[in-house]
Image: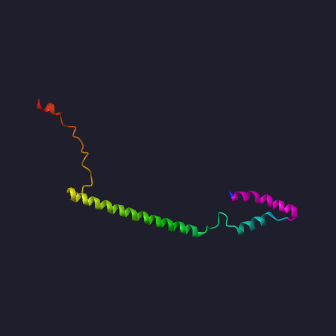
Amino acid sequence: MESVLKKSLLAPVKTLKFCVSGEKTKHGARRGSRRQGSKGRSGKPDPRPLRSYQTELERERKLREAMNAQKNAERAAMRAHFRRKYQLTKVTTHRTHQPMNTNKEPHSQQES
């Protein structure tokens, strides 16, 4: 907001200043000198904030990975415990949902 305000007021103030003082400058020289000093959008940003942001992201990622590794280890220990306790096998698919065989005839018709 501040930069927009500066940009909008900068040109009228400069023209007022030159009108009062009587100085005249060329448009090309004034624009060139203004662009030389400031970075603008084409200038390279300061790498320090970017570097600190990236290190913070890296630190958070490592913390997240450590927490996930801890959770996975706890889950593996619980699975091993319950396998031993209830003598379960290492089954990757659940057998609770077996498909029904629809080709069989009803039980009452077989007896007839």
| Residue at the extreme top | 112
- Residue 46 horizontal side relative to residue 71, left or right: right
User: Which picture quadrant has residue 38?
Assistant: bottom right
Q: What's drawn in magenta, residue-wise?
A: 2-23
Q: Is 19 included in the stretch rendered in magenta? A: yes
Percent x, y for residue 50? Answer: 56, 67
Quadrant location of the N terminus in the rendered image: bottom right
Residue 88 can be seen in this image: no
Could you say which quadrant of the image residue 31 lies in? bottom right
Taking the spot 74% from the left edge, 66% from the top edge, the residue there is 34
Residue occupying image coordinates x 81% and y 65%: 26
User: What residue is rendered at 30% in x and 61% in y?
Assistant: 76
Instruction: Give percent across and percent down for residue 92.
Output: 27, 55
What secondary structure predominates along the stretch shown in magenta? helix
108, above or below 32, in the image: above
Occupied quadrant, residue 102: top left
From the image, which quarter does the C terminus lie in? Answer: top left
